Image (cartoon, grey):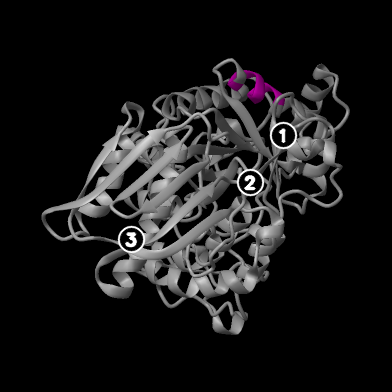
Amino acid sequence: MRFFIIDTMLNLIPLPRNVKQVAGQLAIAGMPDIAADAQLQTVAEQLADIFRVRAASGQAAVKVRLALDAAIAHPEGYRLQIAPGRIVISAATPAGAFYGTVTLRQLVEQSLQQTGAISLPLVTIEDYPRFAWRGLMMDVARHFFTADEVCRMLDVMALHKFNRFHWHLTDDQGWRLPVRKYPLLTEVGGVRRETAVGPDSTRPRQYDGIRHGGFYTAADIQRVVAHAAKLHITVVPEIDMPGHMQAAIAAYPQLGNLGWPIEVRTHWNISTHILNPFPATIAFMQDVLAEVAELFPGPYVHIGGDEAVKQQWSESKAVQQRMAELGLTSEDQLQSWFIHQMGQFLAGRGKRLLGWDEITEGGTPANAVVVGWRGTSHATKAAIAGHEVIMAPGTHTYFDHYQADPKTQPLAIGGLTTAEKAYAFDPVPAELPAAHHHRVLGGQGQLWSEYIATFDYLTYMAFPRACALAEALWLDGGQKNWPDFVRRLQQHKHLLLSRVNRIGPMPDVA
């Protein structure tokens, strides 16, 4: 692909790789004449929506053409040409064509914001992403968000060319996934009697006394999955196990190790409750995963594997006997055995297991994808060992952290992850030998919701850091330019503010 000079006056995020701009503008005063190859009809309808609600009534003289072009090598690449009287978007796949329309949408929206009319620059843009995995994770277990709110987040993700939505559906504080075979998971596990308020370090803990609950129906999930598919976003469900399972054990105590009932967790931090490793529990969790495989057509299922406190395993004579029967000598090996059972089950249903980097402890399942969150060292070792990895280090991608001086911000879990730090993120660690770079699929941002109770606050915490991450995952490192990103963001944030409600303005990132 030929490199053009990038014109920094285009306020696009993520910035396209190659832009050639000439003098002049293309004014569009009505609905363009849109034609598309058969495989691009859905994209053409989405493109028509851009103009249908924005352009003046009547038919414009402008012709828009969407075409597949095998000469475009990258499967998510596209070419956008805006010339007098015509717009052409070419791509090798529908996904690439969709990203071309996203770029065009940003140009249209910005023109309307600035002038009240559609007047587009005459440009040729040739573009493609650096990484195949460009994701955001949304935690709906600690605080529940409706299917409508999830779809709104997907819309804003698509505006930034994210293509993976990691949906954290279960945890100690709530179970949001409908499971036909085990209805108590949502009926009991989907509701906690109250929620801790203030920092987790507060002692004695204080609670709000308000029941918090919610779960999705199968129809809700189908709607979210279908909406994501139209935006070329793959939904990756997460059912966290064997730790982070207090809500499930509250619903079905036989899954635990204590032999008596417990309640859904009402405060944060790490629970000591963990699934037992007996055959009935393995079968139970595989029943759950069977329904997950039905609901989610994508190729990936995330099974967590993180922060599994193994004290109950160590103290249980029955579990220790089970370990001996399996020929295991440590609790880490037992967790690895547990994860392997799930990985084999998912493989039998055409799914690939993802897990946080703790799944490398005791032996990583074959074909598993490791998501590195404890820095990058664990995932780096996994990549060298032959596993594909996704980088999600807390230092750069945890958007539940403060994003500016905590004295100026609403309560967050702690830490400080600025937009500049997110922008500086490179999923390929310097210590990873070049021969293994291809195993880094990409990266993703994390929106853990312990302290994020409303959608307004969720979007406030997500942006502009997600904008910065989107560009960090799209461009090669040498093409990134933080001062120019900040300049473009000043215009781009108006587009965001018109699409999502906030509890306040975005922090100053200059």
For the N terminus, the quadrant is: top right
Percent coordinates x, y for residue 416 in the rendering? 67, 71
Q: Label 2: which residue?
A: 130
Q: Label 3: which residue?
A: 108
Residue depicted at 38% across the width and 53% down the height: 82
Q: CA distance from mark 1 to mark 3?
A: 38 Å
Q: Label 1: which residue?
A: 388
For the C terminus, the quadrant is: bottom right
Q: Which one is nearer the viewer's eye here, 62 or 462?
A: 62
The mark closer to the camera, 1 or 2, is 2
Which element type, helix, strand or loop, lies under badge 2? loop
Does residue 27 sit above or below 365 in this rendering? below
Horizontally, residue 49 falls left or right of residue 401, namely left
Dominant SS in magenta: helix
Horizontally, residue 373 falls left or right of residue 321, namely left
Q: Is residue 173 magenta?
A: no
Q: CA distance from mark 2 to mark 3?
A: 25 Å
Tell me whether circle 2 and circle 3 mark residues in contact (CB < 8 Å).
no
Q: CA distance from mark 1 to mark 2?
A: 16 Å
Residue furthest to the top in view is 348
Q: Which one is nearer the viewer's eye here, 29 or 192?
A: 29
The part of the chain drawn in magenta is 340-346
Identify the amino acid type marked 3. Answer: Val
